[in-house]
Image (cartoon, rainbow, N blue to C red):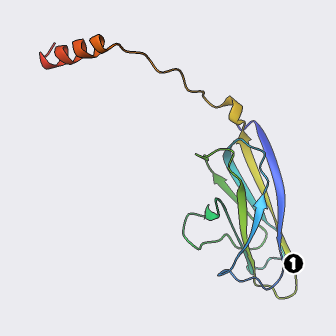
């Protein structure tokens, strides 16, 4: 179970095409993401789309140029972010010509401070390396 949850609302004005999605920062206060939930409220009528990513690249969903779309839909994604503490963005489009639409984006996170810390490297003397090599060569 994740240590904490964060939620944010992102919005897109009408008449935004999927070929030129709006990129909106998604504020996640550090940590390693374990699960993402996207809520597409009723009223979107399949006219909108959302993708998530970082570094200016959409990575959720994984297919290039893909978006989650729908109406009154919840998308749950199990995820392990291999690059913790990186700023995230939502990529949005809205084909509705009259209404601004919003999505809720929730993250389940583990704090980075609890991630494993690297241990100090083991110091091996040159003599030990030579002895191991000699033993390996002799089949011992």
Left or right of 61, for residue 112: right
Find disc 1 in the rendering and name its residue: 100
Q: Secondary structure at mark 1?
A: loop
Left or right of 61, for residue 27: right
- Residue at 76% in and 84% down: 95
Residue ranking furthest to the front = 126
Tag count = 1
Residue 132 lies, with reference to residue 50, above or below; the image says above
- Residue at 73% in and 45% down: 108
> Which image quarter is the N terminus in?
top right
Residue 17 lies, with reference to residue 90, above or below; the image says below
- Local packing at callout 1 (Cα closer than 10 Å; few below 14, some 14-19, many 20+) is some
Depth order, front residue of 71/27: 27
> Which image quarter is the C terminus in?
top left
- Residue at 65% in and 64% down: 56
Residue 49 picture location, percent across and down: 71, 74
- Residue at 60% in and 27% down: 117
Depth order, front residue of 80/44: 80
Residue ranking furthest to the right = 99
Residue 6 lies, with reference to residue 56, above or below; the image says above
Residue 29 picture location, percent across and down: 78, 45
| Residue 4 picture quarter | top right
Residue 124 picture location, percent across and down: 37, 15
Residue ranking furthest to the left = 138
| Residue 110 picture quarter | top right
Residue 76 lies, with reference to residue 136, above or below; the image says below
| Residue 111 picture quarter | top right
Residue 70 picture location, percent across and down: 72, 73
Left or right of 128, for residue 3: right
């Amino acid at each position: 179970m994740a240590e904490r949850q964060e939620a944010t609302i992102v919005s897109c004005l009408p008449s935004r095409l999927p070929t030129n999605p709006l990129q909106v920062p998604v504020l996640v206060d550090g940590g390693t993401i374990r699960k993402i939930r996207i809520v597409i409220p009723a009223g979107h009528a399949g006219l909108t789309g959302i993708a998530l990513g970082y570094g200016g690249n959409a990575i959720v969903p994984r297919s290039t140029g893909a978006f989650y779309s729908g109406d009154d839909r919840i998308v749950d994604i199990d995820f392990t972010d291999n690059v913790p503490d990186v700023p995230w963005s939502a990529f949005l489009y809205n084909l509705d010509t009259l209404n601004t639409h919003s999505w809720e984006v929730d993250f389940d996170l583990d704090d980075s401070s609890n991630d494993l810390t690297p241990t100090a490297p083991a110091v091996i003397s040159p003599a030990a390396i030579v002895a191991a090599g000699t033993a390996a060569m002799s089949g011992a």
